[in-house]
Every structure is written in structure tokens, then in C-alpha cells.
């Protein structure tokens, strides 16, 4: 599987986990953040783009925990 596809899959999985309040959502978000870092190292994403996506995932996770 290409790094681009793996990254998109991991981010989608994390978003779904957070949206459904899955107990494993924190692990899914952590995995997605790691995949975003890999994508940056491979030149697939710009570092600021990955940082923005990671921030949005973290914010969504925090909102789901609070509410």
C-alpha cells in the first residue's frame, strides 16, 4: 500500500472513531498522526498541511472527550 493511501485511510479511520466516540479513538488518532509524519518525511504532504490536519484531529478528539 502506498504511503498516500495509508495516510488517507488512517486519517479517515481516526475521524470515524472520534465521530462515533469509539473507545479506541485515541489510538486511531495517534496512528493517523504518525502516518501524517511519514507522509511529510516522504514528501507527500507539506509539513504545515500535516500540522493543520494533526491539530484538527487533536481538537476533534478533545471535543469528543469533553462532551
Image (cartoon, rainbow, N blue to C red):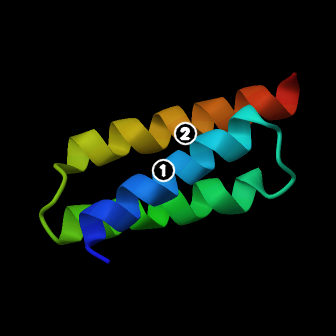
**Secondary element type, mark 2:** helix
**Furthest residue in direction left, as rendered:** 43
**Furthest residue in direction front, as rendered:** 1
Nearest-to-viewer mark from 1 and 2: 1
Check the picture and name the quadrant holding the N terminus. bottom left
Which residue is at the front of the view, 60 or 15?
15
Quarter-wise, where is residue 40 in the image? Answer: bottom left
Along the horizontal axis of the image, is 30 left or right of 20?
left
Q: Position of residue 19 (x, y in %)?
A: 71, 33
Residues at marks 1 and 2, CA–CA distance in whole angstroms: 8 Å
- The residue located at (31%, 70%) in the rendering is 38
Labels 1 and 2: the sequence-earlier one: 1
Q: Position of residue 50 (x, y in %)?
A: 31, 47
Q: Image height check: is 67 above or below 38?
A: above
Q: Image height check: is 38 above or below 9?
A: below
Q: Image height check: is 21 above or below 45?
A: above
Q: Position of residue 67 (x, y in %)?
A: 87, 22
Q: Which mark is residue 57?
A: 2
Amino acid at each position: 500500500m502506498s504511503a498516500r493511501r495509508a495516510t488517507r485511510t488512517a486519517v479517515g479511520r481516526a475521524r470515524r472513531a472520534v465521530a462515533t466516540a469509539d473507545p479506541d479513538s485515541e489510538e486511531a488518532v495517534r496512528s493517523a498522526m504518525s502516518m501524517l509524519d511519514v507522509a511529510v518525511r516522504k514528501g507527500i504532504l507539506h509539513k504545515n498541511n500535516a500540522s493543520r490536519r494533526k491539530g484538527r484531529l487533536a481538537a476533534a478528539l478533545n471535543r469528543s472527550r469533553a462532551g
